[in-house]
Structure formats: C-alpha cells, structure tokens
Amino acid sequence: MTHVLKIENLQVAVEGKPILRGVDLEIKHGETHALMGPNGSGKSTLGQAIMGHPKYEVTGGTITLDGEDLLEMEPDERARAGMFMAFQRPVAIPGVKMADFLRHSTTNVRNPERKEGEDLIPMKDFRRELKDKMQQLQMDMEFARRYVNDGFSGGEMKRAEILQLAMLQPKFAILDETDSGLDADAVRLASESIADIGREKMGLLIITHHDKLLVHNPPEFTHVMLGGRLVETGGSELAEELHANGYERIRAAYPEAEAENLAMAGE
Amino acid sequence: MATDITPDKNAEAESIGEINKYDFRTETEAVFKSQKGLNEEIVRQISAMKEEPEWMLEFRLKALEIFESKPMPEWGGDIDINFQDIYYYLKPTDGQEKSWDDVPEEIKETFDRLGIPEAERKFLAGVKAQFESEVVYGSVAEDLEKQGVIFTDTDTALKEHPELLREYFGTIIPSEDNKVSALNSAVWSGGSFIYVPPGVKIEFPLQAYFRINAQNMGQFERTLIIVDEGAEIHYVEGCTAPMYSSDSLHSAVVEVIVKKNARCRYTTIQNWANNIYNLVTKRAVCHADATMEWVDGNLGSQLTMKYPAVYMLEPGAHGEILSIAFAGNGQHQDAGAKLVHAAPHTTGQIISKSISKNGGRSSYRGLVRVEEGANHAKNNVVCDALILDPESRSDTYPYIEIMEQDVSIGHEASVSRIGEEQLFYLTSRGLSETEASAMIVNGFIEPLVKELPMEYAVELNRLIQLQMEGSVG
Ligand SMILES: Nc1ncnc2c1ncn2[C@@H]1O[C@H](COP(=O)(O)OP(=O)(O)OP(=O)(O)O)[C@@H](O)[C@H]1O
Ligand SMILES: [Mg+2]
C-alpha cells in the first residue's frame, strides 16, 4: 500500500487570527513536493498544523494519514505514526544532550506502542547507528554530546534537523527552509543528504526560497502559497520560474489572495 | 527485657502505653523511657545515657536555655510544630521493631521504581537500623585509617577524640545562631565526624563508604568536618530514595572547617516524606586559599529551610554553593545560600535552581555580605526558577550587604515557565508530554547534576522522571 497524506480544505487560525483559508494537498509516499510562496504567506503554519502545534488551531478541514485522522492525535502520536517536520527555527533545550534526546525519540518512533519508562533501544546499537549517520553528514561525534540546538550555529542547527530525519525515517517529512542559513558548501551537502535519505523513500514537502535544494531534489509538484491558500500548482518548471522571476506574476494573478497576504503581514 | 523504672513523674504521665515501645536500656541495666517533650531533665538524661563529659552536658543545657528564649523565625515558611509533642531521644534500635508491612504502599512502590536494592530498602524505610556496609567497604576504611583520617559518628568521636571536639564543636554554628540550631545543640545525636590530616587527599567521594548508615540520618544529627591544611575531601550524604519517618521534625547542624589550601565539597541529596519539616543549619569557614563547595539537592518535605553558608575568613578563600530544589504538591522549599566575604581577595559563587510543580512553592533566599576591608571580593549569584504549571509558585529573596567599595558583585535571576515551543519540539519527535517535560526539567538542572557522583546523578534524574509522572509525593 502506498502511504498517503491528505489535506482537505484546511483552515488554521493563530490566536483567533485566520492564517490558512482552505488548503488542499495530497502527497503520496515517494513523491517530492515543493512549497513556495512569499514571506508570511502561511507555509510554516501548514507544517505546524500538520504536526499539531497547540497554538495553531484547526478551525476547519481535515488531515489524514492513510485514512487515519491526524487531527485526533497528539504531536507525539503523529510522530509515531510517521510524520516529521524539520523546523524553520529549532528551539534550544539547554541541558538536554542530543544523544539522549535522539535515543528517546528514535525508540518511540520505532516502537510506537512503547510506554513511558519502558526500555530504550540498546545503547550500543544506537551509538553505532548514530555514528554512521553523523559521519555521512560530516558531523563530529562530539556534536551528540552537545545540548539540543543550544548555541548551535545556523548551519549546525539545520544539519541537526537532517540528522534527526535520517534517524527517524518518517513516512512523510516537511522540510521547512532546511537550506536557509547555510553556506554554499553546506547547502550542497544538505541537499545531497536529503536526496540520499528521503528522496523516493518518503513523501517530501520541501519549503524553500532557494533553488539548490530543489536542483538535487527535483519536485514532481510545486505549490505556491499566497495569503493562506495554495493558488497554483505545477511541476518543477514552476519552481524554476519563481526562482528566476519572483512572485510578481503570482501576486498579480491572484489579487484577492495577495490582499489577504498583505493584511496578515500588516497586522 | 529489663524492668521498667520511670525516670521521673512527668514521664509517666506522658507516655503510658508507649513505654515498652521506647524502652531504653543501658549497659548498667538502668532503663530510660523516652518521653515526649523537652525540659532540662530530658537533656540531662540524653547526656547521661551517652556518658558524655561534663562540658558537653553544659553545652547542651546552655543551648536549651537559648532555645527556650528564642522565638521562631518570622520569615521562611509556615512552621506549625509543637515542640512538646516530639520524642527527643530514642534508643537507636527502636527502628528495628517496625515491620516491613507497616511501610506505606507508595513508599514501597517508589523503591521498586527507583530500583533500590532489597537490602537497602528495609534500611531506608526504617525497618532495619543499620545497613551491613562493613563487609563491602572494610578495605576502604582501613585505607583511610592508615592515612590518619578519622571517620566515625559524632557520638563515638566525642568518646575517642575528645580533644578535637572540645576544640571545634559548636564553634562554627554557636547555639545562639538560631532557634533550631539551639534545639539541635541541646538534643543532638548521631551525625558524622571527619578529620582529614594535613596534605591528605581522599580521591573518591566518601559516600560509597558511609552512604547507608543510620547514625548519619538521625533526627537531630550533628556533623563536624575538619579538613586540615592542604587536605581534600568530597563528602556525600543522603540518598534519593524517599526517607520515610514518623518524626515530623528533622533538624541537623553541619559544621565544616576548611584550613589553609584545603578543599572540601559537601554534597547532599535529600528526598523527605511529605510530613517532614526539614530545618537544617549548615556552615563552613574557609581559611587562606581554601575552597568550600556545598552541593545541595532538596526534594520532598512539607517545609525545608536550608541555607548552606560559607564564611571566607582569609585572602584567597573561595566559597561556592550549588543548590537544586524541587517543590511538589504541598511542599515548600525555602532554600538558598549565604556567602560572607570577611577578607580581601575572596571569591564566591551561588547557583540556585528551583522547580515548582503541582502547586509546590520554592523560594530562593540568599545573602551575600562583603565586610569592611574585604576589598577585591568577587561574587556572583545566578538563580533560575522553573515553574511547571499555573498553580505553582516561585519567589526570590536576595539580600546583599556590601561594606566595601572595591568589589565585584553580580546577580542574575530568571523565572521561566516550561516552554510550549520546547515541549512541542520534543513531542513532535515522538516523546510523550511527560517524557518531554521530564527531559526539559532534567536539562534545567543538568549543570548541577553533572557535579554529582555518577550514581546520584542517575538516581536524581530517575526521581525527577517519577515526580513528573506524578507518581511520587
Ligand atoms: N506562532 C505565531 N504567533 C503569531 N502569529 C503567527 C504565528 N505563526 C504564524 N503567524 C502569522 O501567520 C502568518 C504566516 O506565517 P508563516 O510563518 O506561516 O509564514 P511563512 O510562509 O512560513 O513565511 P516565511 O517565508 O517568512 O517563513 C504571518 O502573518 C505570521 O505572523
Ligand atoms: Mg516559514
């Protein structure tokens, strides 16, 4: 069976303020989708809502994974069901070591039925696997002993998100600007790693403002968000067009969405 | 069983029905019946039972007078103790009469979940008075002895090393200091006595040796540590298992003398049952270029009031206090620190972390004093509080008294609520909300936990995990 993530007429509000105004999107396992759109159009909001951030209130519509209602699930249940998001701005958790956190998280995602306090995956196996993955990402093993995102450089943060993607092997991954804040070499490494880890092995939703990531991960579908709606969908040529020419054509073509986008940004 | 002889009339009135349970038998076959309440007669009896020298009896009696004349402190937490409703001295073997069946179910469960070994459980629950540690640690004791280290309980030390006790006992914390230290001085029993001779460095933390020993955990224990010039020691007391006791008041006094160039670290982890008032006075004096560190972890109890202090008496002295407090439902942790710079070029640091949950209340109360002439003193205070829910509370009471110009003093305080973004990050990676918040809390105290001996660190983390699941106290 091919896994399917299906979003229908999704409406999301933050603090009572509507952000998403009816989003439809279907991603099949193995597909790569690009999500583009100007700043503040609602791209990250879509990711947060899919993962179940308590601040992002779903006011209408549905999200299902293989027919199961994701909206009924807590964030950890969504992760255990196979969902993952690489954060645009990962938060620091001082005092919590990357390795400890990852061992917990990997254990829970691999044994979705695990209860609190039950055994974690054996330290030895975990270490070996972590070490392999870190080597692939050209990360120093010392990194595993650092505190989660605490004092990480922009590049380190994004690399740590990719490391988690590699460890957790989700069915669907949302990568929210995982290429931003990286230097040219790091962007290439990140793009190649994502292609290696996720391409065709997961359903990918890649949110990006740059083209490098998409060059290594050419999308079958490109969606453009404006004012909380997906106003246009095309193939990889749409991503190329937007990279080359920007959003002027889109803004002009969808004045209503553009007005909403301006209104959101203005408030 | 010896025959009953009532030591005085009051006692009879007080303790009919309790008599057999608290029988006290001495070598001379005389029988002492412990009785509730406190008066001169009881203090005399305690001293006589212990066959103490005259000076100690006088010390106790004077302390009793002071205790009776002093009011309870107005600040801190609410204290509702009837001092006449407490047994001030019990036969050390009394505990053995209790049976495992009497131990409350939730305490047993906690032992289970903490993975406390069978043999230790009975001791910790007060079913067994003494844990057989000699066999395991005998060689360590021998080794220490060879180096001239004295490590015994304070009662024995009074018999075997009277000159050391005469010189130091009660000099760091005089009975006048406060009401509860006066009480301890009048009725003290047990506690540890340690003397480390000049230049002797004890490489391992001393908890492995005496970790489990009834004498160290008395109700009114009295600990005295003398670290002679250039010597080093790390002493660890307590453990993370909940200490179950029917006594409602625990009031210890700990005095530490750190001589020139010496180092002492004193680590405490305590987890009291919910009915306990834990009112402890701890103070160290630090001589030239000496270092004193208090590492203090407080969990449980109804009210803990504890402010470890370091007096830096000579140039180059360094005092450091790291404290963690966890206040759960019905608990008030009023903990903090006191650093007194009494000489030039002395340095001090206080790091305090508190966590409040389920309506618990934690307060940081700290005093930094720089005395006149203590120029170039440097002091830094960091206190962070983490509040886990809206019902819980945290307060900070920093007191700073500076009588000198040329000093550097820093103070930072932060109060944070457990972050929604942090929780979401962790849960979106598959951690349950409970696991995630336990992880955040453990991370919050990690800078202190990493100073603990390994097994304590592991136990403390596990304990916090349990606290977060709400299954303990
Ligand atoms: N947690 C939040 N609190 C308040 N407002 C929010 C929050 N998250 C999103 N918004 C608002 O929702 C709108 C969409 O934001 P979102 O982060 O989804 O945009 P985006 O498309 O990801 O933009 P960018 O390209 O800049 O990352 C913005 O107006 C933003 O201010
Ligand atoms: Mg965004």
Image: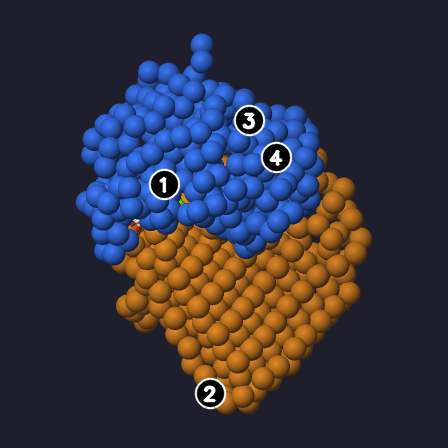
Chain colours: A blue, B orange
Is residue B41 rendered to the left or right of residue B381?
Answer: left
Which residue is the site of mark 2? B403
Question: Which residue lies at the image location 54% right of the left edge and 39% below the top edge?
Answer: A213
* Secondary structure found at label 4: helix
Q: Chain of mark 4?
A: A
> Are labels 4 and 3 assigned to the same chain?
yes
Q: Amino acid at mark 3?
A: Arg
Which residue is the site of mark 4? A193
| Cα–Cα gap, marks 4 and 3 | 9 Å
Could you say where residue B305 lies in the image, as x and y percent from the top left? 39, 59
The residue at label 1 has a CB less than 8 Å from ligand 1: yes
> Are labels 3 and 2 assigned to the same chain?
no
Is residue B92 rendered to the left or right of residue A246?
Answer: right
Residue A144 in view of the camera:
no
Give A257 or B23, whichever is nearer the viewer. A257
The mark found on residue B451 in the picture is none
| Cα–Cα gap, marks 3 and 2 | 68 Å
> Are labels 2 and 4 assigned to the same chain?
no
- Single out the mark in the foreground, 1 or 2: 1
Classify mark 2: residues with Cα within 10 Å, few (<14), some (14-19) or many (20+). some
Question: Which residue lies at the image location 36% right of the left edge and 41% below the top edge?
Answer: A43
Compared to B400, does A50 lie above or below?
A: above
Q: Amino acid at mark 1?
A: Lys
Which residue is the site of mark 3? A199
Could you say where residue B339 lies in the image, as x and y percent from the top left? 50, 72
The answer to the question of whether label 1 and label 2 lie on touching residues, with beta carbons closer than 8 A, is no
Give B300 or A112, whichever is nearer the viewer. A112
The mark found on residue A43 in the picture is 1
